[in-house]
Image (cartoon, rainbow, N blue to C red):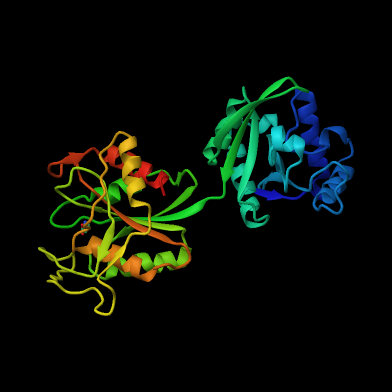
Amino acid sequence: MKLIEPMNEYAAEIAAYRQEFLAAGDSMDGTGALRRMEDPVAWIAFCQRLRSRETAPNGWMPATQFLYVREEDRRIVGMIDVRHSLNGFLEQYGGHIGYSVRPSERRKGYAQSMLREALRYCWRDLGMSRVLITCLEENEASRKTILVNGGVYESTVFEPAEGARIQRYWIEKPRVLLITGFEPFGGQIVNPSWESVRALLDRIGPWQLVKMRLPVVFGRAARQVIQRAEEIKPQAVLCVGQAGGRSALTPEMVGINLRHGAQPDNEGALLQDAPIDPDAPAAYFATVPVRAMARAIQEAGLPGQVSYSAGTFVCNDVLFSLLRHFDGKKGIACGFVHVPYQTGQGEPSMPPADIARALTAAIQAL
Ligand code: PCA
């Protein structure tokens, strides 16, 4: 599947697309002036004029028109129209993006993937940071398409010309969160940190999650997460670890410059009161909103509490190393959350689904 801008070789397909809507008596959303223009070649030329403010006709906002084409048979399954900015009508009722899927290609998930691609175009090519998308109150399919793509409901307005109730949704440019969990250690066969991180949705509010599993090894875990963060340049890094014995999820306030294990790490290193970096300060404060995260967990009805010690084992090693590396750099917020045992590991414990729900709440507070 791909989005392409209209070109003359698709003229016959465009005419067929239009015909199918006229026959079905369906509204041809996301096609600009196609309903009124019988000649597809004229419509293609019109779309080209709309591409920039200088050439757009009076009363039209600059916009990019796309055809959503299935490559195997070069069939147009949908159309989507991205307005670069809003005028009074669009600001209220129309929004930045309009789209349609032809009646014979519906219920195949095309609207969702088409919108996802168009949003990428908004973020990457147009440099937009948020878009307004609207749908008729009764259009369940369109609402789902918007929600799956991260839409947040704002309000419902009445459009007098059509006598329609229209829902307004905003979609924010995704921000990348690198989130990690650990492999099992200390004779356990699971680590609830990785189990819960891996169960999280890939998209939470404005955050696009990139997940990673870390080894319980001094130095190596920290190097791996720092290297990945340097590659993908996330806006935040949140590491999650198991703290057997705790009964709440605990966002950590501070990472300290110390390695000490009552037990060896997963490669057998047993470190005793060794500094992580003899030249670095004694400690760094986490740069995520620790207290707001704990509060968000509580407000979700789950146990959350600020912690002032991430211990001295591999979790603290990772937190301290991340904070030292990204100290004040490029707005990358770094933090750590310890989680209790999951059911079956020992007590106190929480069901893994609750741990994931609590992490979701914490992420929403980032
Ligand atoms: N917890 C350990 C290391 C890995 C994990 O999940 C810790 O608290 O340091």
Counting from the top left corner in percent of width and height, residue 129 is at 60, 51
Closest to the observer: 114 or 71? 114
> Is residue 258 visible in the rendered structure shown here?
yes
Q: Residue at x 61, y 39 (%)?
A: 110
> Is residue 216 visible in the rendered structure shown here?
no
Counting from the top left corner in percent of width and height, residue 90 is at 73, 37
Counting from the top left corner in percent of width and height, residue 308 is at 23, 55
Is 240 on the left-hand or right-hand side of 8? left
Closest to the observer: 285 or 354? 285
Q: Is residue 334 above or below residue 247?
A: below
Q: Residue at x 69, y 44 (%)?
A: 68
Q: Is residue 20 above or below residue 337?
A: above
Q: Residue at x 28, y 56 (%)?
A: 253
Q: Residue at x 37, y 44 (%)?
A: 200
Please, which residue is most extreme toward the bottom here? 279
Q: Quadrant of ligand 1?
A: bottom left
Q: Is residue 312 above or below residue 137?
A: below
